[in-house]
Each structure stands twice: as C-alpha cells, then as structure tokens.
Image (cartoon, grey):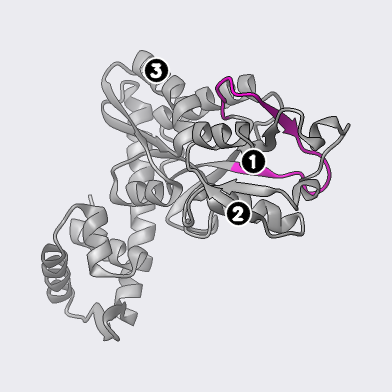
C-alpha cells in the first residue's frame, strides 16, 4: 500500500485546490494541508507554491506524482493477480455510474457479483461522470460507467483505463401529432427551430444535447430546463418543447412520440467503463463487465462495442 499522503497530493493535483481535494476525500482543508506538509518534510522538497489565491504544484510534486502513478498501477495489478489466484475474492467492491446506467445496467451486474462472489460486499453509487472519477481516484469505487464530458479526464489519462462499452443512440421526443411525426426520416437538424428542453447548465445531459446540436450545425433555443426524463417528457406532452432522450432511458406513458434520428452525425452517447489503471484484470471486474455487456446487448441490440 502506498503512503496515503500521496493520495492527498494526487487529489490536490486532480481538483486544483486544497478545498476541493478535501471535499472529495472527506477531509477538512486543514487536514489536507497538514498531510501535504508532512509529505513535503519527509521528502525534503516543496510540493506546493502560491499562485494567486490558490496554489500550484512544484516540479518536485509532479515528479512524485509521475512515479506514484506507475506504482499505483503496479499495486492494482498485484491485487488483481492475488484475487485471481485465491479464487474467492473478498472485501468491498463498488460500482458507480450516471443515472441511466445506475438504473438499467449496474443492478444486474451487482446481482451477478453477489451470486458469484459471496465473500464480497457489493455496493452501487449513482453519480455524475466527473464524480465517478473522483470516487475511483479516492479508492471509493472500483468500476464506473461514464460518458466523456468536458469535466471528465481524457481517455489518455494514465491514472485510469477507459474502455468503450456501448453506443446509446439519442432519440427525439416530440408531442403526438407533431409535424416531424409525419416524416419518413428525421435528422437532428430538422428540429433546429424547435423550443428545446435541456438539463441544467453544467449537467452531463446539458453537455450531451449541446454537443449533439452543435455537431448538427445549430445552437438550440432553450425554452425550459429539466434534469429528469419524466419531467422533460411531461413538458413535451404539454407542448412546451422537445427533448433528446437516450434509447437506454425508459419513458412513462405520456402522449408523446419517440423518433429515431437518421443522418450524419446521428447523435449517440458513448458509454465507457472506467477503472484505475492496472485493475482491469481483476476477476470481479471481469465478471461485472461481462454482465453489463450482456445486459446492454439485450436492451440495445448491436450497441455494445
């Protein structure tokens, strides 16, 4: 096990401030600062330097983090090998994911793990993609189902392994008898002049719809905000606008029409399976991913990567 004070330094590097790192680690800011001072004294180097109202990492801190990343990956590989050798993994195992994945994919995987590995304690956490990466980095989650957004680490980030899992097409949801329901094929650009219902700014759903509309060549006219599919669908049913809904999401029985979109680019959200680098060979992780892929294929034939 690596020095836990290095995890504190990694959290500061990841979040950018001592306060944000403390919140992610469930510490107080003073506790984070104290651990960083301890680590700096043990190493005989300065790790943080003042920068405006905040701090920035020193060259020495970046050197520590570079080596720590390689060591973390090696430790994860060791844990994975040990779990495979014993044949009876034990201890906690946590799955996390955004709302749709947490509803339709993670419960089935958790049930499979509970049945196949009675010695482990399975836990599921619903969280936005950026928070999922925080959980992985803090060691509070083992596998995350995420969507790439502007707030998530790039796939090249060496701290994580991010594996394409499935493509989830986005469908247009409009009121019944809407003009677009009479067309044989509909592209996203055909809805450019409609009033739109999006998630709140900063949410994954908001980013998803804006990105899809931008790729189709227009900026949506945002009329209302709704984070839940049911709320958005209710607004559509009453004629307040239209929404994009992932095909994996299930809608209640409102008087609306769900339209599969055509054309290039046909909007699709890419769901990734993320874990800490080095952990991908863990047998429990392998079982979870296999179950998730099977479930996704049943719900969305042909969607699994």
Q: Residue furthest top?
A: 115
3D distance between C-alphas at marks 2 and 3: 40 Å
Q: Is residue 148 visible in this depiction of the protein?
A: no
The residue where tag 2 is placed is 222
The residue where tag 3 is placed is 111
Q: Secondary structure at mark 3?
A: helix
* In front: label 3 or label 1: 1
Residue 262 colored in magenta in the image? yes
- Circle 1 residues within 10 Å: few <14, some 14–19, many ≥20: many
The residue where tag 1 is placed is 244
Image spot of residue 230 (x, y percent): 51, 31
> Quick check: 144 above or below 19?
above
Q: Is residue 275 visible in this depiction of the protein?
A: yes
* In front: label 1 or label 2: 2
Residue at 41 percent across and 34 percent down: it is 282
Q: Secondary structure at mark 2?
A: strand
């Amino acid at each position: 096990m690596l020095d836990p004070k290095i995890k504190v330094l990694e959290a500061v590097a990841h979040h950018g401030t001592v306060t944000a790192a403390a919140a992610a680690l469930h510490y107080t800011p003073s506790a984070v600062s104290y651990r960083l001072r301890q680590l700096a004294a043990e190493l005989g180097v300065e790790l943080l330097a003042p920068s405006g109202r905040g701090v920035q990492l020193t060259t020495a801190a970046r050197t520590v983090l570079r080596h720590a990343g390689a060591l973390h990956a090696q430790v994860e590989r060791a844990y994975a090998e040990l779990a495979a050798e014993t044949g009876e993994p034990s201890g906690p195992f946590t799955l996390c994911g955004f709302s749709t994945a947490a509803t339709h994919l993670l419960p089935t995987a958790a049930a499979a793990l509970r049945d196949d590995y009675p010695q482990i304690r399975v836990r599921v956490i619903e969280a936005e993609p950026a928070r999922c990466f925080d959980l992985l980095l803090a060691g509070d989650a083992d596998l995350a189902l995420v969507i790439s957004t502007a707030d998530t680490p790039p796939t090249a980030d060496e701290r994580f392994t991010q594996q394409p899992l499935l493509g989830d097409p986005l469908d247009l949801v409009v009121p019944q008898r809407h003009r677009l329901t009479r067309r044989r094929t509909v592209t996203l650009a055909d809805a450019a002049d409609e009033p739109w219902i999006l998630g709140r700014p900063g949410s994954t759903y908001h980013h998803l719809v804006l990105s899809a509309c931008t790729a189709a060549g227009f900026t949506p006219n945002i009329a209302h905000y709704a984070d839940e599919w049911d709320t958005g669908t209710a607004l559509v049913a009453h004629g307040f606008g239209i929404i994009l809904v992932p095909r994996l999401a299930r809608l209640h029985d409102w008087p609306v029409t769900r339209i599969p979109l055509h054309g290039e680019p046909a909007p699709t959200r890419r769901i990734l399976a993320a874990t800490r680098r080095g952990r991908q060979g863990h047998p429990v992780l392998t079982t979870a991913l296999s179950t998730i892929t099977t479930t996704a294929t049943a719900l969305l034939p042909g969607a699994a990567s």
